[in-house]
Image: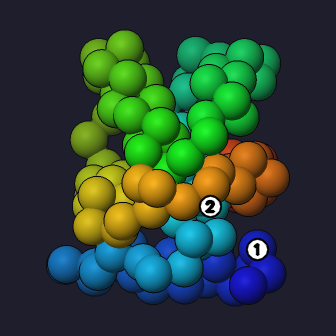
Amino acid sequence: MEAIDMYKFLDKESNKEKPSGTKDIELYYFICGQLARYMTHNNEKTYAKTTPFLNAKTGKETKQELIDLLKHKKEFIKQNDKFERLWGMVEDSNFDDQVSLPETFLLGYTYKNIMY
């Protein structure tokens, strides 16, 4: 799936009351990148926070890095319905044992953020 297609799909899904998890591993990592960027956007001017995600070997490690980032940045993250819906999509997806896709994570991280 192309980046623009993933973005358009997420834009539609993130406006639903209860979006479903994804079965598309590329979309999963694109979402993870979007979430990580949202959590680091206001106070990070470098890509330093991407290192743990790029080093993650599996979907489970990527999800744990998101959780750790949320724990560390929770006081800086504004409440946002789209953020919560995308987080739910990640939680409802099961790529724990799948090989990580750092390129797709970076694509989501650097692409226009859907939460704004």
Residue at 19%, 78% (x, y): give it.
18
Camera sees residue 3: yes
Query: Earlier along the polypeptide chain: callout 1 or callout 2?
Result: 1
Element type where label 2 sits in the image:
helix
* Residue type pointed to by label 1: Ala
Residue 85, position in %: x, y? 29, 63
Colouring scheme applied when the structure was drawn: rainbow
Q: Residue 9 or 99: which is nearer the viewer?
A: 99
Residue at the spot of label 1: 3
**Label disc, if present, on residue 65 of the rendered structure:** none
Quadrant of res 75: top left
Residue at the spot of label 2: 30
Which residue reaches farthest left?
17
* Residue type pointed to by label 2: Phe
Q: CA distance from mark 1 to mark 2?
A: 8 Å
Quadrant of res 57: top right
Quadrant holding the N terminus: bottom right
